[in-house]
Image (cartoon, rainbow, N blue to C red):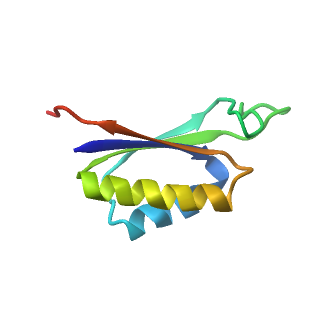
């Protein structure tokens, strides 16, 4: 099992959800209105100066589906480079 975490500009929520749907992912946890600053994008702080915010989705799934999802997130990152997308693939040793 793997965990895929991806953090993205809230403005591309629909595109992210579509990628998940195409990969057959329907179980996930979403965190909204996250603040942060990345290497290749403006800060996302939810303020009048930096009004954007991020969201994060956490998916735990089989290895193959995780790799497929990560691949689709790579494609999405190329389309929305200025928005800021990060994805992380982590091993899941145990779940209860």
Left or right relative to 39: residue 54: left
Q: In which quarter of the image is residue 69?
A: bottom left
Q: Nearer the viewer, residue 24 or 26?
A: 24
Q: Position of residue 78 (x, y in %)?
A: 64, 59
Please report the residue visible at 72 percent of the width from the left and 34 percent of the height from the top: 46
Quarter the N terminus occupies: top left
Seen from the viewer's position, the closer of residues 7 and 47 is: 7
- Which residue occupies 32% across, 41% down? 3
Q: How many marks?
A: 0
Vertical placement of residue 28 versus 36, above or below: below
Residue, x 64% and y 30% (percent of image)? Answer: 35
- Quadrant assignment, res 45: top right
Q: Where is residue 55 in the image (x, y as percent from the top left)?
A: 55, 42
Task: Return the x and y of residue 30 as percentages of the image width and height.
Answer: 44, 43
| In the depicted structure, whether residue 71 falls above or below residue 52 | below
Locate the C terminus by quadrant: top left
Residue furthest out toward the right:
49
Examine the rendered structure and indicate whether residue 23 appears above or below residue 86. below
Q: Is residue 87 left or right of residue 41?
A: left
Residue at point 32% right, 66% down?
Answer: 24
In-image side of 62 versus 40 (left or right)? left
């Amino acid at each position: 099992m793997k965990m895929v975490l991806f953090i993205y500009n809230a403005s591309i929520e629909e595109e992210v959800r579509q990628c998940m749907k195409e990969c057959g992912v329907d179980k996930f946890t979403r965190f909204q209105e996250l603040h942060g600053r990345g290497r290749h994008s403006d800060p996302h702080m939810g303020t009048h100066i930096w009004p954007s915010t991020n969201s994060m989705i956490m998916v735990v799934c089989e290895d193959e589906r995780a790799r497929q999802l990560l691949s689709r997130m790579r494609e999405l990152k190329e389309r929305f480079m200025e928005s800021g997308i990060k994805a992380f693939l982590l091993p899941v040793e145990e779940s209860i």
